[in-house]
Image: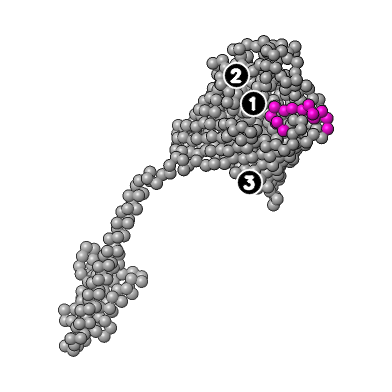
Amino acid sequence: MKPNQNSSIFPFIKGKNKSIVASIIALSLFGNTILPAHALVLYVDPETEQVYTSPGKNRVKLGKFKQVNSTEEKQTPEELRVLDSKLIELKAIEKRLDEQQEAIKIANMKSEEKAETPQLQAKKWYDRISIGGYTQFRQGAGLSGDFANLNSPGDKAIEKDTNFFIRRARLVFQGDVSDHLKLYMQTEFAGGDVAVRDMYGDIFFDKKKEFRIRPGLSKVPSSFELLQSSRDRLSLERADAVSSGVRNERDTGIFFYWTPEHIQKRFSFLRDGLKGSGDYGVIGFGAYTGQGLNQRDKNDNVHLAARVTYPFQFSNGQIFETGVFGYMGKFVPTVGKNAGASILDNPTFNKKGYRDERIGVHAVLYPQPFGFQSEWNWGQSPQLSADRTQIESGTINGGYVQAMYKIDNSWGTWIPYVKWQKYNGAEKDTTNTPFSRVRETEVGLEWQVNKQIELVAAYANMERTNVKTLHHVKNANIARLQLQWNY
């Protein structure tokens, strides 16, 4: 048996499909079964490599196939019936192949339509929101000195008769709901009351997200340590010298930030284990009420703040960040009687507020492995007079220096540190804005067991004013332990 045309048609049939063609031809001939005189004509589709018994679109004729010898006369009626049955079977196979090809075309068309309308597959905005946070569980113990009269505005665990203490319990909801809007909300559950710590939206002007505005309740662009999250900070509390400017670090306002795309990546890298402050812009500025976290304005006067910083990266990979910050406005103090203090019930004060302004500088050498961090600021603030009868304008100055060393091993990450701070100035967010003098040295060790668990042990020698009773503690030694878990 052989085709009656040139075999150059067969190059259209590739690989294993050659055997398929051969099988169909063999099936058509039925082994020793003899074809009728009119023979069998076969066609092939070069694209799909399917074989057919009838002509059609894109089908190339293979040729007529008939018996080589001359035994056609010897076909019996039984052989002819078998032949007809096989031909019917072959037609059914061909029909099924055509149906399969049509189904494939329809599926491809649907797939193309799906690719052309990706918005149909886009997530809803609420599907883009992630939930996280952290909790800090702390214990403090007085070792020696005048611990009974010690008080710190930043750490309520430093008080008489205090043992176990939940310092922070934060829950964060955030997410990019579109290319031009990010939502951020943070709540605080420690202390018995639920309070909002952040509630803002980042509105981006470009796809690279280099330019944005941030209206709402958020951190004020100021010192490095104020912008650094408490989950990342080494020392247990922020230095009084900078935190007294914006106690709780936040206020209601609107800020503009600019961060080049490559610096966005650098800020993100620094947050991942190197104690960075996060992305608050290479340049950031704006206006806020100036009265503090979750406080309404009292004098229809806004504070203005600005900050410039830049993280330089050297050829060896070491990163050094430096910058300047400042703010100005008028602050209206809260007046009354301090518990246990000899003060008039209502000291004289200006209800329109007092000059409240600072300028500061910061420098940070990130721990790779040795690190160094320092800030200093100067300015003016409302302050209780020496005779405790009135509020007046006073000067402030202070800062801190901190050294650290990062060690990575099979047990996790270890960062020993030492921090010294100094502050002379008012605590403007405390009733009657009393003057505070602080000298403090803290030595500690942070152990990052993994991404979720951190343990800090710290010893501190403190000289500080108790701003509630106005008693000045000249010497107190305390030890604190803090367990932090991230989620």
Q: CA distance from mark 3 to mark 2?
A: 39 Å
Residues shaded magenta: 144-157
Rendered residue at 65%/47% (across/down): 450
The quarter holding residue 225 reads top right
Q: CA distance from mark 2 to mark 1?
A: 15 Å
Q: Which mark is residue 34?
A: none
Q: Which residue is mark 2?
A: 328
Note whether 391 is above or below 136 in the view shown: above
Q: How is the image coloured?
A: one colour
In-image side of 48 versus 283 (left or right):
left
In-image side of 304 versus 96 (left or right):
right
Q: Nearer the viewer, residue 176 or 44?
A: 176
Rendered residue at 46%/35% (across/down): 181
Q: Main secondary structure of the magenta part?
A: loop
Q: Nearer the viewer, mark 3 or mark 1?
A: 1
Whether residue 156 is in magenta: the answer is yes
